[in-house]
């Protein structure tokens, strides 16, 4: 990612999440896509790169100060739309533990049945693929 891409990315992400993340309101931050449904496909560079395209697989595995990855935060908040996008970029996220050494499916089980179903389905698919090898 070039320096100008980093600046554009920081500006867009900062504008979206700074107010809610600073207050610790992850439910509000997670719901951003409901009030701005096309944010994920917003181009950030002159080349038409989007946030997901600019993010590499390893960046998605970074744990935030609370011990969670972005995928874990999507699981905690029940945001399946974001989880689908992140999982598509890095399927290993399904097995990366977050706070209290919990898997994303455990984090989602505090009340987000639709997220638990999504994560369980992906885990079953992965186990089936491994068993046929």
Image: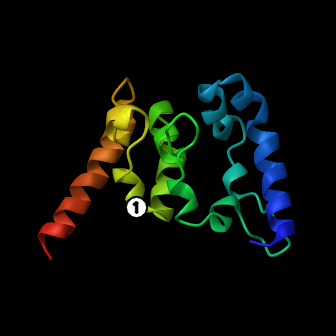
Name the residue rendered at 65%, 24% in the picture. Answer: 24
User: Left or right: 52 with respect to 101?
Assistant: right
Name the residue rendered at 21%, 54% in the picture. Answer: 124
Q: Position of residue 101 (x, y in %)?
A: 35, 37
Q: Position of residue 130 (x, y in %)?
A: 18, 68
Q: Quadrant of the N terminus?
A: bottom right
Foreground residue among 113 and 130? 130
User: Left or right: 95 with respect to 74?
Assistant: left
Residue tagged by mark 1?
A: 91
The number of discs equals 1
Name the residue rendered at 24%, 59% in the picture. Answer: 125
Q: With respect to residue 128, does 47 lie above or below?
A: below
User: Left or right: 126 with respect to 59?
Assistant: left
Q: Residue furthest left?
A: 131
Q: Position of residue 7 (x, y in %)?
A: 85, 59
User: Left or right: 54 with respect to 27?
Assistant: right
Model colouring: rainbow
Q: With respect to residue 71, does 114 lie above or below?
A: above
Foreground residue among 21 and 109? 21
Q: Quadrant of the C terminus?
A: bottom left
Crowding near pointer 1: few (<14 within 10 Å), some, many (20+)? some
* Disc 1, SS: helix
Name the residue rendered at 64%, 67% in the picture. Answer: 53
Q: Position of residue 27 (x, y in %)?
A: 59, 27
């Amino acid at each position: 990612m070039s320096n100008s891409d980093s600046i554009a990315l920081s500006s867009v992400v900062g504008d979206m999440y700074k107010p809610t993340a600073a207050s610790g309101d992850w439910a509000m931050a997670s719901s951003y896509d409901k009030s701005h449904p096309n944010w994920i496909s917003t181009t950030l560079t002159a080349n038409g790169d989007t946030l997901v395209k600019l993010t590499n697989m390893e960046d998605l595995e970074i744990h935030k100060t609370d011990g969670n990855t972005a995928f874990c935060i999507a699981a905690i908040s029940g945001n399946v739309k974001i989880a689908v996008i992140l999982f598509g970029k890095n399927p290993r996220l399904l097995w990366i533990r977050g706070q209290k050494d919990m898997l994303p499916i455990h984090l989602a089980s505090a009340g987000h049945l639709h997220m638990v179903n999504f994560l369980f389905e992906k885990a079953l698919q992965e186990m089936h693929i491994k068993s046929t090898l």
